Image (spheres, grey):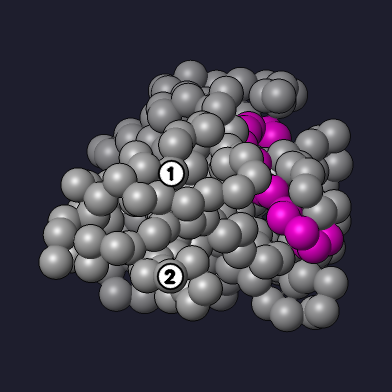
Amino acid sequence: MVDILNTTLVYMTGTIEADMHYAVEISSDLKGWSTMGSVTPTDSTVLKEIVGSFSKAEYPTSAFFRLRKDPTPLFVKLDPNQTNAVEIRKNQTNATLMSLVARAADSDMDLQRIRIDLGQNPDVYRKVFKIFYVTDDAGSILASQELNSGTVAKEGLNYFLNISGFHYAVPHNSSRILRIKADVLETAADPVQLSYAIGILPDGIRGQDDLQLDRYAPSLPLGVTINVLNTVVLNTSSL
């Protein structure tokens, strides 16, 4: 047995594409393959480096490794232009909180639901936000949901808001921008806490592929910090 970091016999065909989901597979004879795990490369990293991420396991010295693109996955990540901290003001409308990139691979995707983690402070829906919107890359509203005791649910220590009832098409092998926006209450800066963390937990976004099978993303939690400024904005919106 040998640690795979020291295994030089790797096997790959084709090109590794950034932000695509791959299964990492192992074989002793290049005929029968079994799955070790999965990765989503952020660049054209060579296969040996990717296999190295599974270095805690041991495999035979004759092992070969390869990447296989997973079929019909849905991937979601933060827009590269998204900042970690977002500033909002009292009475602001259409304020962009999160900008996401949704990518479909090998199948068209129909995005239908998003579940937003509002954190642990109930002030976030009682005193800070009035309405959440989901918009497409052109800024058109796909769906909206008011925040109140009937729409926000507490699970464990955190509060969650589900926004559903929309259809946003993401063609296969392409990406689309999905934004979460909000109208802010005039009482937003009244609470003692002026910063809030909101985000999307793993599998918080649901879509359907060409076979009408449910697909979920992201694979890792995504989030931003919302900073509430104690100033009033009248009749304005953020891009």
Q: Quadrant of residue 26?
A: bottom left
Q: Quadrant of the C terminus?
A: top right
| Quadrant into which the N terminus falls | bottom left
Front one among 173 and 57 = 57
In primary-sequence order, the first of circles 1 and 2 is 2
Q: Residue at x 43, y 75 (%)?
A: 34
Q: Is residue 128 left or right of residue 191?
A: right
Total labels drawn: 2
Mark 2 neighbour density, 10 Å: few (under 14) some (14–19) many (20 or more): few
- Residue 228 is left or right of residue 131, and the answer is left
Determine crowd level at label 1: few under 14, some 14-19, many 20+ residues with C-alpha closer than 10 A.
some
| Residue 159 percent coordinates (x, y) | 40, 65
Residue 29, numbered label: 2
**Residue 231, magenta (yes or no):** no
Most common SS among magenta residues: strand
Q: Looking at the picture, which amino acid does disc 1 mark?
A: Leu
Whether the residues at callouts 1 and 2 have beta carbons within 8 Å, the answer is: no
Observer-nearest residue: 194 or 37?
37
Start and end of the magenta stretch? 93-109
Residue 128 to residue 165: above or below: above
Q: How far across and down, in percent of the image, does residue 36 sit?
A: 37, 68
Q: What numbered label is drawn on residue 47?
A: 1
Residue 100: numbered disc: none
The answer to which image quadrant residue 186 occupies is top right
Q: Is residue 14 visible?
A: yes
Residue 45 sits in quarter: top left
Residue 98 lies, in percent from the top left, at 56, 39
Q: Residue shown at 47%/73% (left/top)?
A: 33
